[in-house]
Image: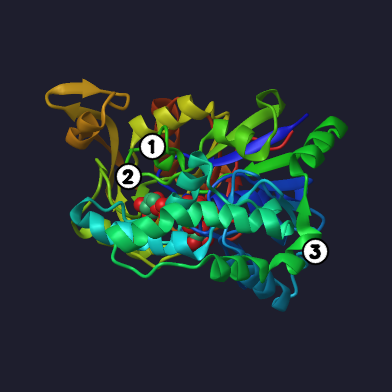
Amino acid sequence: MPAIVVLGAQWGDEGKGKATDLLGSRVDYVVKFNGGNNAGHTVVIGDEKYALHLLPSGILTPGVIPVIGNGVVIDLSVLFQEIDGLNSRGIDTSRLLVSANAHVIPSYNRTLDKVTERFLGSRRIGTTGRGIGPTYADKMSRVGIRIQDLFDEKILRQKVEGALDQKNHLLVKVYNRRAITVDEVVEELLAHTERLRPYVADTTLILGEALQRGDVVLLEAGQATLLDVDHGTYPFVTSSSATAGGACTGAGIPPTAITRVIGIAKAYITRVGEGPFPTELFDEDGEKLREIGHEFGTTTGRPRRCGWFDVPIARYAGRVNGITDLVLTKLDVLSGWELIPVCVAYDVDGEILTDLPMTQTGFHHAKPVYEYLPGWTEDISGARTLADLPQTAQDYVAFLEARSAVRISAIGVGPERDQTVVVHNLVD
Ligand code: GDP
Ligand code: IMO
Ligand code: MG
């Protein structure tokens, strides 16, 4: 029963889309199990570049069945815009399956996401403004609207009424906005029902049967370990479970089905939005990483904050997720530094820690302890085997592997599918 998880080992944008696409031809299903259109996964195939937000990256591989799992929150107009965009480029999306249990993002939650951030002021999270947080909050408060509700107008109306009882108080009394009517929300949601119908399925049943048959199911995470609502830098996190455990609940598959957990980490590190970031660079090096690495958000276009590789974070991601293989991406971006600093530990108020501090206060106080590794100047984008890499680049990878205590199985040397050095096979 081989299920493989692909997830982010840092703060997102590690290159999960490329890794999923790379494995695409060897898998039968690709399931998105968490998040929504806050994600932005870029896949480059030849001269074509695809930015996927809501659809799993497997949609680009002919023959693969893409699945939006129950753990996802769906903005229906974005879903159909993305489908239309791919169709107009000749990509077939007809195999897509959408879980009847996934939640929808009504427009009032986009409004609430934005106004909440504005009211938080300096305490804002820096969300993508897509309504993700309020929709997951509704799910937990049991006032969410699910895909299946769209097919029973009476139930839908009742649920929208229940939700608006709370939302309108907030919107009108706290945020000084106009009240929303039940009719307008029901109309907005029903506008998509007929188009949605053929995609809706009991995805946990389908995936369970697929695993029984021995099909390969790849579970593609949005966001990342340090953005996970339980294991990330709370409250500067997203509102879903982006770690390996989330793959089970968000897709409805058993933990015993998972045979591989592939973590994706950049050879340095980036973050979008607010929150603590021990190795963040505010100098020319940070600018250089941003420029060479094209570190601007796929979803919001915001410049990404850049810093050096953080070993305690990699160790943490390895442990929390049970990472069996790490894909180290964007090593090519590091060409041209004489010395490359690597954060091997934190100094937290005088105490040296090689693991993450227990508390957020500790993490806010963490100062990186660096070791400096010799760099290389060669363009490594053409490397396809370890031996093609300059010795100092090989040593850099070996150092990260040893200190992070995770096996590095592939190395990204460019955005294209084939710009990858495979050290160990990622699919058995
Ligand atoms: P995701 O959210 O984890 O899927 O990552 P994003 O797509 O948001 O950001 C990763 C960016 O890096 C994308 O633009 C990719 O095309 C690009 N990328 C992925 N791997 C590599 C690599 O090894 N080298 C370089 N130069 N770019 C890469
Ligand atoms: P991918 O899948 C990087 C960040 C936002 C913000 C926080 C909460 O492309 O790696 P949200 O809108 O989710 O409530 O915002 O999480 N964030 C991401 N950062 N990559 C992502 O996705 C992200 N999805 C959310 O910037 O700090
Ligand atoms: Mg991204």
Q: Position of residue 32 (x, y in %)?
A: 63, 48
Visible residue check, residue 376: no
Q: Element at badge 2? A: loop
- Mark 2 vs ligand 2: CB below 8 Å: yes
Disc 1 marks which residue? 232
Q: Position of residue 201 (x, y in %)?
A: 78, 50
Observer-nearest residue: 379 or 345?
A: 345
Q: Position of residue 353 (x, y in %)?
A: 25, 23
Q: Could you tell me how far apart the alpha carbons at marks 3 and 1 are, in whole angstroms?
A: 35 Å
Q: Quadrant of the C terminus?
A: top right
Disc 3 marks which residue? 94
Visible residue check, residue 21: yes
Q: Position of residue 399 (x, y in %)?
A: 39, 32
Q: Amino acid at mark 3?
A: Ser
For label 3, count other residues whose C-alpha is less than 10 Å away and answer few (under 14), some (14-19) or many (20+): few
Between discs 3 and 1, the one toward the N terminus: 3
Q: Element at badge 3? A: loop
Quarter of image, res 336: bottom left
Q: Are marks 3 and 1 in contact (CB under 8 Å)?
A: no
Observer-nearest residue: 35 or 356?
A: 35
147 sits to left or right of 403: right
Q: Residue at x 58, y 46 (%)?
A: 421
Disc 2 marks which residue? 236
